[in-house]
Image (spheres, grey):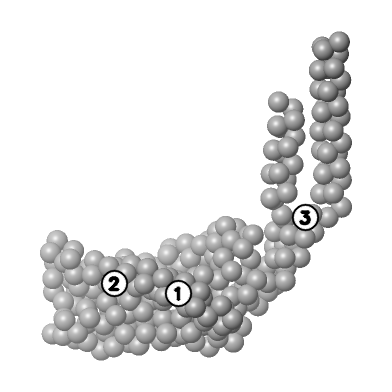
Amino acid sequence: MEYCRLSTSFIISQRRPKIPWLKVISSSVTWANLGAILCHEIPVNVLFVFLPRYIRDVMKVSIQSNSLLSVLPIIFFLLSKIGASQLDHVLKKRYPDFCATKLCKIFNSVASLGLGAFLMAASFSGSKQVVLALTCLCLGTASAGLHTPGCLGTLVTMAPGFAGSLSGFAYFFISLTSILNPLLIGAVVRQQSAAEWSLVFQFTSLVAFLPLVFFNLWGSAKEQPWSSLSSSKTVGKEQKNKEGKVVATIATMRSSEKDQSIAEKI
């Protein structure tokens, strides 16, 4: 029993590298990737949360009757995420030598450009152009789905060993924007007019365009040096000392078990 406990504790201790938070927050790649994720989440969050109100205020369809219209952009978004992830997998398998960061930036650029352009187009759609406005919103969310193999995928690739912690770090800021979004929308949309909603879509469109600049300049899908360095440090002197102690203890236990079995035979 003691042998199992020591072996298990040794294996678990090997899998717990310390996260170099100082290097994480001082890395330009971290903030470029995080900024791109926020510029994806803000427009998408505004669309998914406030779309029923937009349809009610501008398209003059009651909230009780617009459930199908409200869910259409979400369906397009989910299908796009699945399709983009599969396409990314196929391209990486077919072209293994192609730079992962370049492929990531291509996906992200198409996503940001499409999301921003279609949101801007929707902002100029009046109350009489219901089909055009809804089509633009569906195409915008479909474009946003390409962020999955883009900036969203960097949470895993930039530091595979710390993917969970980095995701939690990123979603802390995403949660803050989710809190601020209703406050900002409430401050802008007071009369429930088409002009106010047009201003909202124009703002979210500009936010969606931002990663075309900073993510393409400083973003990266490559594993960062601080990720591998931290992992190697954890298997340093302290880890080797632990390993030596565990191995010595296990060897002692095995020898005692052998002596006991020999004594029983005699």
Circle 1 residues within 10 Å: few <14, some 14–19, many ≥20: few
Residue 146 location (% of width, % of height): 41, 76
Q: Is residue 79 above or below residue 198?
A: above
* Residue at (47% x, 62% y) in the render: 175
Residue on which disc 1 sits: 90
- Label 2 crowd bin: few (<14), some (14–19), many (20+), radius 10 Å: some
Q: Work out how far the residue at label 3 is from the one at label 1, CA to CA, in angstroms.
A: 35 Å
Q: Tell me which residue sits at (13%, 85%) in the image.
A: 128
Secondary structure at badge 2 equals: helix
Query: What is the crowding at mark 3: few (fewer than 14 residues within 10 Å), some, or many (at least 20)?
Result: some
Is 172 positioned to the left or the right of 136 in the image?
A: right
Nearest to the observer: residue 14 or residue 55? 14
Q: Which is closer to the viewer, label 1 or label 2?
A: 1
Figure check: 69 above or below 258: below
Where does label 3 land, which residue?
234
Q: In which quarter of the view is residue 255 placed?
A: top right
Residue at image x 33%, y 75%? 141
Residue matched to label 2:
76
Q: Front-most of 147 and 91? A: 91
Label 2 amino acid?
Answer: Phe
**Among the two numbered marks 3 and 2 on one chain, the one whose residue lies closer to the N terminus:** 2
**Disc 1 residue type (three-letter):** Val
Q: x, y percentage for residue 63? A: 17, 64
